[in-house]
Image (tube, rainbow, N blue to C red):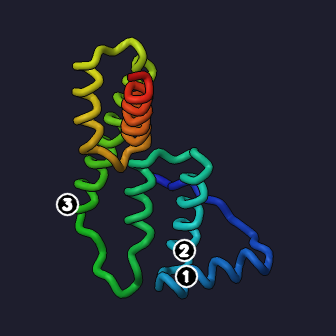
């Protein structure tokens, strides 16, 4: 038996339909990719899709009709990167939860590491938190 993907049948009103057609024309996408790209963007903005998964889906559904399709190797690389980003984001989230209890050396270590992963949500928060800590230290002196 063949695996069947989950599917939705959407009935769009005139404005939503025209917006999807405009997206399709602007990005030179197929009808299904235009709808999936819009769905991906919306789910990411609402917080239901992680940064890593968002990047994979965005790259997958943004391929125009003119472009060459991704090779299986490229798809596998993107999925591997998304998994790595997901794990790192979890790690940075845990670091944030323990930030106040960390010593200067540990904070410095995590700050350097987060500097290399600025595209991740929680890495950005660590950088912002470290900047606030620096500002507080200079104002206390």
Vertical side of 99 occupied by 45: above or below: below
Q: Nearer the viewer, mark 3 or mark 2?
A: 2
Please report whichever mark, 1 or 3, sits nearer to the chain's N-terminal start. 1
Label 3 – label 2 distance at C-alpha: 24 Å
Q: Is residue 47 visible?
A: yes
Residue 16 bears which disc, if any?
none
Query: Which residue is most to the right?
Result: 13
Is 20 or 105 nearer to us in this picture? Answer: 105
Q: Is residue 93 visible?
A: no
Disc 3 designates what residue? 73
Query: Which residue is most to the left?
Result: 73
Q: Secondary structure at mark 1?
A: helix
Give coordinates of residue 4: x percent, y percent.
Answer: 50, 55
Q: Secondary structure at mark 3?
A: helix
Instruction: Using the rendered view, name the quadrant where residue 121 is placed.
Output: top left
Disc 2 designates what residue? 34
Please report whichever mark, 3 or 2, sits nearer to the chain's N-terminal start. 2
């Amino acid at each position: 038996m063949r695996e069947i993907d989950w599917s939705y049948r959407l009935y769009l009103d005139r404005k939503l339909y025209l917006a999807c057609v405009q997206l399709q024309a602007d990005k030179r996408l197929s009808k299904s990719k235009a709808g999936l790209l819009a769905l991906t963007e919306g789910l990411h903005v609402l917080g239901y899709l992680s940064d890593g998964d968002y990047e994979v889906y965005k790259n997958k559904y943004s391929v125009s009709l003119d472009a060459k399709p991704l090779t299986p190797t490229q798809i596998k690389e993107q999925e591997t990167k998304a998994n790595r980003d997901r794990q790192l984001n979890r790690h940075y989230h845990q670091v944030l939860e323990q930030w106040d209890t960390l010593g200067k050396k540990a904070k410095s270590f995590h700050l350097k590491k987060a500097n290399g992963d600025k595209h991740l949500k929680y890495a950005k928060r660590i950088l912002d938190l470290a900047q606030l800590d620096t500002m507080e230290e200079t104002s206390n002196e």
